[in-house]
Amino acid sequence: MNKKTQEKDVVIAGAGPAGLSLACALSGHGLNIALVDRQTESALKAPAMDGRDIAMTHLSRTILTELGVWQRFLKSHIHPLKEATVQDGDSPYALHFERTDDAEAPLGYLVANHHIRRALFEQASEQQDIELLPEREVSAVGSDGNRAWVDLGSGERLEAPLIVAADSRFSETRRMMGISARMKDFGRVMIVCNMNHQGDHRNTAQECFYYGRTCAVLPLAEGQSSIVITVPAARASELTSLCPEAFAQEAKRMLEHRLGDMELTSERFSYPLVGAFSDRFVGQRFALIGDAAVGMHPVTAHGYNLGLRSADTLATQVIKAASAGRDIGSPQVLNAYQLRHRLLARPLYDATNMIVRLYTDDQPIAKLARKAAIRVGNNVAPFKRLITHRLTQIR
Ligand SMILES: Cc1cc2nc3c(=O)[nH]c(=O)nc-3n(C[C@H](O)[C@H](O)[C@H](O)COP(=O)(O)OP(=O)(O)OC[C@H]3O[C@@H](n4cnc5c(N)ncnc54)[C@H](O)[C@@H]3O)c2cc1C
């Protein structure tokens, strides 16, 4: 054995929200966990704002509470979502989601991505059984029947019965393991920023599928929202190069004045939209979680919720095997994870892409179908119940 080789039980490549969640979920069960990331320790510890406000379901809140993470959010960082509406084109008619079981309870919660990452990092770094290896690039990964290994750019090698990739939708570790993924370039860019506004957001998330652009309002504190504008790439560069005042005017116009006067209060962040669905979620002594398994279009706000579920599902299988003294990287453990997570992810991924396809098509026939879908959605009670149940179920 090379003197720079370390033996671990689980090596996780990527200390983003999914990798950190898995490390926290595995902690406390007699396993030695290594978490590798190319970012510096200070960037991981105090992540910079990236403009993403993550809409989280009640189940995500339950899982994060069990991990000891939710309790770390400041109250002022959690924004309850009371209702959600979806509108199409030039019509004021809206598909409406609200709770019918408990009018006082929120539909979901919004927490900024950098607060989620900071809280997860704090929780992980307090655990003795998690070793954080920052500023390390995964340069090679491999496995045989008995063990798996990760080589780092620093010259170190980590060996373990199980390697997990959580290194983004463009996962290099996935590619190194020879696992293919279907990528879908949506040809659009999402601009996200925080804005103050005159009007009341009524704690309602609003998705407006206009023609040629999609705009969303995610309600934060009073008089403040996260504004999400999705447009073709050339239009996105025009919008981000406007001065803050001109951008605020343009945002107000694009949102049809629904929030009154607006003021830009943060940087504008641009995200080119590319989806990814991995052809397999597991390999020999290897598993994919988070965006490395399924990278969703953000329109349905499933990405991290699904990534957290992947971490929770994999951790459950691994802990079950470890406590029974079985091999945690065996095909039995990994296939059980893959089966469960694919069953959950596939319909969500396909339905999201279908929504994107329909609501970015401005042909006359599609415009009719768009309006019809919203009316049908509003009037088919089981559909609304299913969506609301997905958002509010606890376990
Ligand atoms: C605009 C926007 C809005 C969104 N809104 C929502 C929402 O409302 N609700 C929701 O649930 N989700 C939402 N998402 C999705 C959510 O942000 C992602 O699903 C989530 O961040 C993915 O986490 P991850 O840990 O899988 O990957 P990432 O966040 O991409 O983290 C990957 C980590 O791996 C590290 N890494 C990469 N390659 C290597 C390597 N070779 N070696 C070492 N380290 C490496 C990176 O440094 C990084 O830390 C949104 C996304 C966007 C873009």
Image: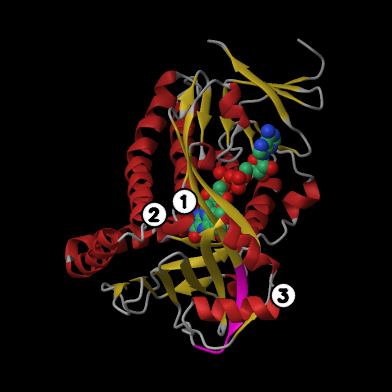
Is 127 a magenta residue? no
At numbered mark 1, what does the secondary structure look like: helix, strand or loop? loop
Q: Nearer the viewer, residue 384 or 198?
A: 198
Task: Please tell me how many numbered marks the rendered image carries.
Answer: 3
- Specify few, some or many for label 2: CA neighbours under 10 Å numbering under 14, 14-19, or 20 or more: some
**Among the two numbered marks 3 and 2 on one chain, the one whose residue lies closer to the N terminus:** 3
Q: Classify 172 as above or below 57.
A: above
Residue 20, can we see it? no
Q: Quadrant of residue 146?
A: top right
Disc 2 designates what residue? Answer: 356
Percent x, y of residue 383? 22, 60
Left or right of 123? Residue 303 is: left
**Residue 112, relative to residue 281: is it above or below?**
below
Of 308 and 214, the residue lying toward us: 214
Type of amino acid under label 2: Val
Residue drawn at 66 percent across, 66 percent down: 240
What numbered label is drawn on residue 243?
Answer: 3
As measured in the structure, the alpha-carbon distance from the residue carrying label 2 to the one carrying label 1 is 8 Å
